[in-house]
């Protein structure tokens, strides 16, 4: 039974007009709505935060009660902030005693009050619980146990009664279901759903992050069965295709890549260039409404751990049937882009194609060809690399001119031995070969977005809003502490942010300041409303080039096929809007999981190499010490003031300095120091360091 929006409005209006809250029977009598429909509608309105149900069973509209709906953002020290759903409202502090049983992640209704001249939020009611289960570590007592959650913002330990705790041991890592939430000063109560292992087991961090972010490696049997039954059939029944198998075509990926969803071909003409971007035709194999499609939608993205990937599609598709492997025919969607001599797009054409890749190239090999460290006798390959470099140079100049921001921040590369032991962490080096593929994919994505926007009323866009001016101003102030003079622009434009990014990149603190600058930016999202992409300085942008690992790309392929190749995919605005929101949320979930597993690996590496000395620099002063950044590990840690035992040290927050009273020794933001690890806290994923003189 689909709820009628008119029925919902009718109930809200009825409650607004009443001089007092009404119970269920009163609403039933006054509205004349059928009993089952009314019960379901009231429940939906509560979840949506439109009305509130009091403990006496009566209902009232939130608007009349002057209540704000939002999400609780907890702090480890026991207080929290209310993040209002209405983005025009500011976040509001919630004192510990006014949480009313709410915990981090809960959706709540709250009243905003004034206390000593400052605004506070007092939680009135929890609408929906953010955490129904947690992953954590066991601390055992004789008659009960506690779960210490691996979520520092969830600031309660969870009490486990003896009937659930008997077989548990200290430092067991568990999935715990919450059966009672905090009330009247009592901790929440839970029961153990699964023991994942012990904190010191090899690879336990992978299990923790998989469970915490609800990531599943294996696919349901129904999905595997469906893939097995349909993949070969769809390949043999490819439909009308343009044959591009005679085009010289290559894939360029990382050394360890297993799914190749993009390939390129290129020609130089008298008037400019012709670029072919071939993308795996995943939409041909993954049809709407199938078990494969439902599972791909739920996952929405592939997730990458240092040792393995959690793919969006089963291996039969991602690594075989859809993967553009060399020397085999594969189905593709091809974007043919014609350029003038300076790299401006003149014409774009789209094809359902069949291709055959000639080489599976790696970034390192292509870069060595460019630098002359490698040679090849294949004239076609020489030609492709030379022309690709030539066009990429022109595209980079063009994009720099319009203001595309290139933060170029390194990522950590984890190196394992044959037994799976982590033996080193090094910053990933971005080479020109990466820029070739990045720029060609940006061109294809932008060309597709522009075409769809011109020819159809509804599509899925990749959008990136303007940064918060307040955050940019705070960033500029931080740059001054590092001795870098960055002027605050009168108007925030991509060109201005690009200039700031280039200035901080040239400094010896490039990674830290670049990361801080990234945090001033809004998050890029998927949306059916095109507001442009600030970071790329693009008026119209989408994701088209990675349908093996991103569901939005698959949606865009379906829209394009409907427009051009007589497919009958129903382009439904409501569905696309929900899908865009879902994919944005799942992308953020994946990014959080990847960030967390990297932190685990780094901390374990520190413990296993505890005598190693690292070069670091101070990146922030706090009231009880200073934070340091280790560039080799791309890791932030903390040096507590109590570990500086050769003098009495005083913190001066105004000047971002710590100085010794007797010696006059100073520690400032930007100073380089040598450190080694002191202790690691896996509950909070933090590390403390000591200085090495």
Image (cartoon, helix red, strand yellow):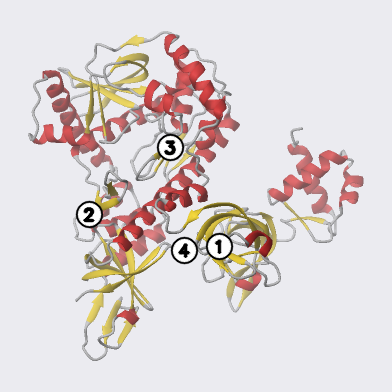
Residue 505's disc is 2
State the separation of the CA atoms marked 1 and 2: 36 Å
The residue carrying mark 3 is: 302
Label whose residue precedes the other's in the sequence (3 or 1): 1
| Disc 2, SS | helix
User: Residue shown at 85%/59% (left/top)?
Assistant: 19
Question: Residue at the location (12% across, 33% down)?
Answer: 370
The local crowd at label 1, few if under 14, some if 14 to 19, many if 20 or more residues have their Cα within 10 Å, is: many
Residue topped by disc 4? 683
Give residue 154's mark.
1
Q: Which one is in front, 192 or 135? A: 192
**First-in-chain label (3 vs 4):** 3
Residue 424, percent from left and from top: 25, 53
Q: Nearer the viewer, mark 1 or mark 2?
A: 1
Q: CA distance from mark 3 to mark 1?
A: 27 Å
Q: Quadrant of the N terminus?
A: top right
């Amino acid at each position: 039974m689909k709820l009628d929006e008119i029925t919902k409005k009718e109930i809200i209006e009825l409650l607004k007009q009443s001089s007092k809250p009404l119970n269920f029977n009163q609403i039933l009598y006054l509205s004349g709505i059928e009993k089952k429909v009314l019960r379901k509608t009231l429940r939906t309105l509560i979840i949506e935060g439109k009305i509130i149900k009091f403990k006496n069973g009566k209902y009232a509209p939130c608007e009349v009660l002057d209540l704000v709906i939002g999400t609780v953002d907890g702090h480890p020290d026991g207080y929290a902030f209310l993040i209002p759903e209405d983005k025009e409202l500011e976040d509001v502090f919630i004192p510990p005693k006014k949480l009313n049983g709410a915990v981090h992640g809960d959706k709540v209704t709250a009243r905003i009050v004034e206390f000593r001249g400052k605004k506070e939020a007092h939680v009135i009611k929890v609408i929906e619980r953010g955490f129904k289960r947690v992953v954590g570590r066991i601390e055992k007592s004789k008659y009960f146990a506690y779960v210490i959650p691996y979520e520092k913002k969830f600031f309660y330990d969870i009490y486990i009664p003896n009937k659930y705790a008997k077989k548990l041991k200290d430092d067991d890592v568990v999935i715990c279901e919450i059966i009672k939430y905090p009330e009247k000063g009592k901790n929440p109560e839970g029961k153990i759903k699964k023991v994942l292992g012990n904190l010191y087991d090899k690879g336990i961090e992978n299990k923790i992050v998989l469970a915490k972010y609800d990531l599943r490696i294996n696919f349901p049997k129904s999905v595997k069965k469906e893939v097995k039954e349909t993949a070969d059939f769809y390949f043999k029944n490819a439909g009308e295709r343009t044959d591009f198998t005679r085009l010289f075509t290559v894939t360029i990926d990382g050394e360890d890549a297993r799914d190749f969803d993009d390939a390129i071909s290129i020609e130089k003409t008298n008037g400019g260039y012709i670029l072919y971007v071939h993308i795996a035709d995943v939409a041909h194999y993954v049809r709407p409404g199938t078990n494969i499609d439902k599972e791909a939608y739920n996952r929405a993205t592939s997730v990458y751990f240092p040792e393995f990937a959690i793919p969006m599609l089963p291996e039969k598709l991602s690594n075989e049937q859809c993967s553009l492997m060399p020397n085999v025919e594969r189905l593709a969607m091809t974007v043919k882009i014609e350029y003038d001599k300076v790299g401006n797009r003149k014409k774009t054409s789209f094809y359902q194609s069949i291709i055959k890749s000639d080489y599976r190239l790696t970034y390192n090999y292509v870069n060595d060809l460019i630098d002359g460290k490698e040679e090849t006798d294949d004239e076609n390959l020489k030609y492709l690399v030379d022309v690709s470099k030539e066009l990429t140079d022109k595209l980079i100049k063009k994009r720099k001119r319009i203001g595309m921001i290139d933060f170029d921040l390194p990522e950590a590369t984890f190196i394992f031995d044959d037994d799976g032991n982590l033996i080193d962490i090094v910053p990933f080096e971005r080479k020109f070969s990466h820029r070739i593929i990045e720029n060609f994919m940006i061109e294809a994505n932008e060309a597709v977005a522009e075409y769809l926007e011109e020819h159809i009323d509804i599509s899925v866009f990749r959008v990136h809003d303007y940064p918060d001016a307040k955050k940019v101003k705070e960033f500029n102030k931080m740059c001054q502490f590092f001795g870098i003079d960055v002027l605050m622009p009168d108007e925030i434009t991509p060109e201005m942010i690009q200039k700031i990014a280039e200035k901080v990149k040239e400094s010896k603190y490039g990674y830290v300041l670049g990361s801080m600058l990234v945090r001033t930016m809004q998050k890029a999202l998927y949306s059916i409303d095109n507001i442009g992409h600030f970071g790329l300085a693009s008026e119209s942008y989408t994701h088209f080039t990675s349908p093996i690992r991103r569901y939005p790309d698959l949606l865009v392929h379906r829209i394009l096929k409907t427009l051009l190749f007589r497919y009958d995919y129903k382009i439904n605005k409501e569905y696309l809007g929900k899908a865009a929101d879902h994919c944005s949320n799942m992308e953020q979930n994946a990014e959080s999981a990847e960030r967390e597993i990297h932190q685990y690996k780094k901390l374990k590496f520190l413990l296993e190499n505890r005598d190693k000395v690292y070069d670091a620099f101070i990146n922030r002063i706090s009231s009880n010490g200073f934070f340091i950044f280790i560039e080799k590990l791309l890791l932030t840690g903390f040096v507590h003031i109590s570990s500086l035992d050769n003098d009495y040290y005083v913190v001066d927050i105004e000047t971002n300095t710590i100085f010794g009273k007797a010696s006059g020794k100073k520690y400032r933001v930007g100073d380089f120091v040598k450190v080694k690890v002191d202790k690691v806290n896996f509950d909070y994923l933090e590390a403390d360091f000591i200085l090495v003189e």
